[in-house]
Amino acid sequence: MTTIYRKTSLDGKHKTGIFYCGDCLDDSWKPQPYGEGPKHFTGRWEEAPLDQCDVCYAIDQDSRDEYENWSNDMDRMQWEEDYCSENGELK
Ligand SMILES: [Zn+2]
């Protein structure tokens, strides 16, 4: 399973548009060619389950499925509410 992370500033207040999956994050800790150090590690990383890795385009399908189920549930609840109020029924 893939986990997607988003880079934020050290205090977590500023969120960047940089996304890495767990694997690419691990890879980028390794020494880089041409003696460059890791580039993205002056902040913190927080989980971003609905986003996509910038490097390998991985997504966290499990979290997406969960989110989809959750929003489908919300849609259905909304629909039932509308349906009931159209028919003048009290809950
Ligand atoms: Zn990746």
Image: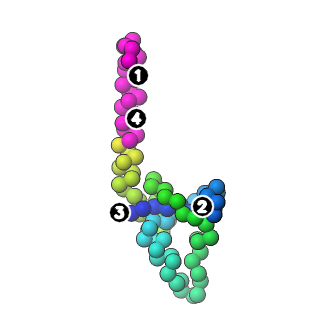
Q: Is residue 88 within the magenta segment?
A: yes
Q: Amino acid at mark 1?
A: Asp
Work out whether mark 2 precedes mark 3 in sequence or the reverse, and give the earlier one: 3
| Residue bearing mark 4 | 74
Separation (CA) of disc 3 from disc 4: 26 Å
Work out whether mark 1 precedes mark 3 in sequence or the reverse, and give the earlier one: 3
Q: Position of residue 87 (x, y in %)?
A: 37, 13
Point out the stretch of residues depicted in magenta: 70-91
Q: Amino acid at mark 3?
A: Met
SS for dot 2 = strand
| Residue bearing mark 3 | 1
Residue 1 in sight from this viewpoint:
yes
The residue lying furthest to the front in this view is 11
| Residue bearing mark 1 | 82
Separation (CA) of disc 1 from disc 4: 12 Å
Q: Is residue 55 left or right of residue 62?
A: right
Q: Position of residue 50 (x, y in %)?
A: 45, 53
Image coloring type: rainbow
Task: Please report the residue visible at 53 percent of the width from the left and 83 percent of the height from the top.
Answer: 32
- Residue 8's disc is 2
Q: Amino acid at mark 4?
A: Met
